[in-house]
Amino acid sequence: MTTSEALEQLAELQRTMHAYNHASGVIYYDAVTGAPEGGAQGRGETLELLSGVSFSLFANPQVGELLSYLKAHGEEIPPQKRREAEILSREYDNISRIPKAEYAAFNRLINDAGAVWHKAKRENDFASFAPLLEQIVGTLIRFAGYYDKDCDPYDFCLDEYEKGLSKATLDRFFSALREKLVPLLRKVKAAPQIDDSFLHKTYPIAKQREFSDFIMELMGIDRNDCSIGETEHPFTTNFNKHDVRITTKYVENQVASSLYSVVHEGGHALYELHTGDELAGTCLATGTSMSIHESQSRLFENLIGRSEAFTDRLFERLVSLFPEQLAGVTARDFYRAVNRCEPSLIRTEADELTYSLHIMVRYDIEKQLFSGEIGVADLPRVWNEKMEEYLGITAPNDTAGVLQDSHWSGGSFGYFPSYAIGSAYAAQIMAAMKRELDVDGLVREGNLSPITGWLTERIYRYGKAKDPEELLLIATGEPFNPDYYTDYLTEKFTALYGLK
Ligand code: ZN
């Protein structure tokens, strides 16, 4: 094989993988936005076939040889191609280290666990889910050992979702949160609560859709390349930089719910819409990690979207669409209402301040479970102890407690921390941006393009060409520092609730 033949094969492999991912992605998008319920079985068969073919295309020894060849000839190939091969090698090593039969057995296990978890959650029956959870944790620990028999299995899980992330970094991060945010929340709880009742009047959905159009326009999202659909659980997906899909869910008596879904998913979309043209068609043409992606959605949702400059702008349009619902309400009332903080049981409904505390509960549990400090049977008890410690509330049952999230049933251990880390990255990135741009001034003018321009230059355009750590360094000029996040929250909620 010559180097140029190898590069041609590398391009061909990525084109093919991309086509399979594109097809499966559209089928999934269709399933959650418009497909009739009766389509489930036929769709399942098609998806299984597509994933089987793409698995065998990728996890085969020829691909292994190609990637080793490219690694050995790294000096002779352009840096971007080297990076493509490096990213693909990581995926290849991950998949090929596990014996095929065990890989298939694990997929069956999480498929079964998903169904059992659904039923257990509905019936508040943790005991029926526990044996499957035990098997999942056991399998993941064994799989980590296949990769490196001396590695720490939980560190291995963390690294899977966020290259370079470890317990050492997270322990430092979460202990800073524990020290600063838990006492702050206690003070907020003792202060008079903000009235947000006007957000729960009836807001007709047709007009909420019009409001979404306004938000997309304000954020500078090109509708030619990004559409908005409706689903039960809002998400963003992308097929290439000219075909990004966001979704939202409208609820008549929760006008802020869809509003902030659109801003959040819009943040994810902007990232995907602005990856570099030179990356198109390669595995690098997408966000670099879950945490960095989440930093971009949360930067828009919270740092910009819940700033007074932005809520003032939203309020102006909202009043013209909903004059009756907002009669007697001021822009200041609106700003305070969308920032109301109240400890609640359910993570996905948590406000900006309490959100990371929900993640801390899960992080502590995952870490202890993987080190053997606690067993699966201890989970409901430990869950409640942690909720009490961090949020000052306990769940009346496991449905609203340890059974609330689907992640563990799908084998996603080590995934939760990226939500919290993403929020903290967002605060650090915003601080860096504010050293160079008058962010509030631009938002007040409704001119967000210098903001997306800054983000494109520092983050978006790189796609997966940089790992998260390096990207954060490029964007902010310093390594990860959780102080930006705790300082931002302390300052914001101290002013909002008039704390001393
Ligand atoms: Zn998100």
Image (tube, grey):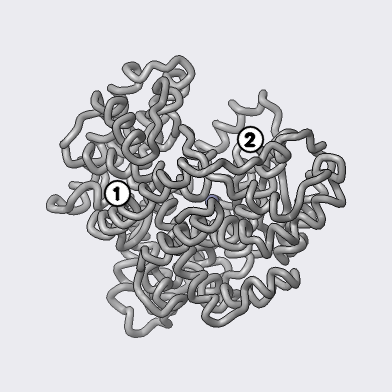
Q: Quadrant of the C terminus?
A: bottom left
Tell me what residue is drawn at x 42 percent, y 66 percent.
484
Q: Residues within 10 Å of mark 1 (few under 14, many from 20)?
A: many
Tell which residue pokes out farthest to the bottom in this image.
76
Residue at 49% from the left image edge and 72% from the top image edge = 431
Mark 2 or mark 1, which is nearer the start of the sequence? 1
Label drawn at residue 424: none
Residue bearing the label numbered 1: 157
Residue 464 x/y as whole percent: 46, 67
Q: Is residue 477 above or below residue 409?
A: below
Residue 128: image x %, image y %? 34, 17
Q: Give the left or right position of residue 375, taking residue 214 as reference.
A: left
Q: In this view of the protein, which residue sits in the foreground, 390 or 432? A: 390
The residue under label 1 is which amino acid type? Cys
Determine the residue positioned at 42% across, 52% down: 420
Say whether residue 70 is visible: yes
Residue 375: x and y, percent? Answer: 20, 29
Is label 2 in a helix, a strand or a loop? loop
* Position above or below: 350 against 425: above
Q: Give the CA separation, mark 1 to mark 2.
A: 28 Å
- Is residue 122 toward the left or the right of residue 455 in the image? left
Disc 2 target residue: 232
Position above or below: 260 against 287? above
Apparent side of residue 151 relative to residue 342 in the rendered image (left or right): left
Which residue is painted at 28% across and 75% down in the image?
Answer: 72
Three-letter code, disc 2: Glu
